[in-house]
Structures are given as C-alpha cells and as structure tokens.
Image: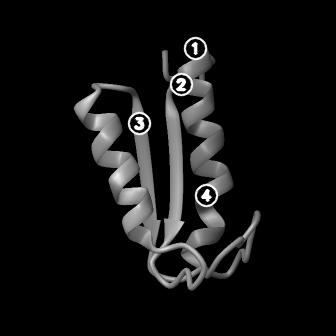
Amino acid sequence: QTPPIFLVHSLDDKAVPVENSLIMMRALQAAKRPLEVHLFEEGGHGFGTGPKDKPCGQWPALFAAWLDRHLGRKG
C-alpha cells in the first residue's frame, strides 16, 4: 500500500519536467491515495531547505505541518 505522499516541485526545474510530478499526482489521485502537492514558480532543481527568500523556501515548514497531521501530532 502506498503511504501518504508529500510532493514538491518547482516550475523552473531544468533537470526534471514538472509534468513528471503532475503524472505522479494524477496517478495517486486515481488510486485515491493521500497526497499533498506544492508547485513553486521558482526554485530550480534540488533547492534543498532554502532559499529562505523565495517561496520554495517554505516547503520545510509545509512538510513539517503535513507530517504532524499524518502522525497525529497536535500543532
């Protein structure tokens, strides 16, 4: 069984087309699997935990909140 998925992708990723993430999203939706997706306008490929000055830098906090929800932790 597929676990809940947290998916992050930037639209300007030159290494992996955003369509790959969209295909994954559609497949998980069709299978009715838990899924959260965040697409960022900028961030390139492998933006890690930053940059803090761009919206993609928010993904660690979004992931932490998602993880807390899936682990049943109170926020």
Q: Nearer the viewer, mark 4 or mark 3?
A: 3
Residue matched to label 4: 59
- Please give left or right for residue 61 compared with residue 29 in the image: right
Near mark 3 (Cα within 10 A), the count class, few <14, some 14-19 or many ≥20, is some
Disc 3: which residue: 35
- Give the residue type at disc 1: Gly
CB within 8 Å, label 3 to label 2: no
Residue depicted at 55% across the width and 80% down the height: 13
Element carrying mark 4 = helix
Task: State which tag comes first along the sequence, 2 or 4.
Answer: 4
Kind of element beneath mark 2: helix
Which quarter of the rendering shows the C terminus?
A: top right
- The answer to whether mark 4 and mark 3 are in CB contact below 8 A is no
Left or right: 17 in relation to 16:
left
Question: At 53% from the left edge and 57% from the top edge, which residue is drawn?
Answer: 8
Reading the image, the residue beneath label 2 is: 69
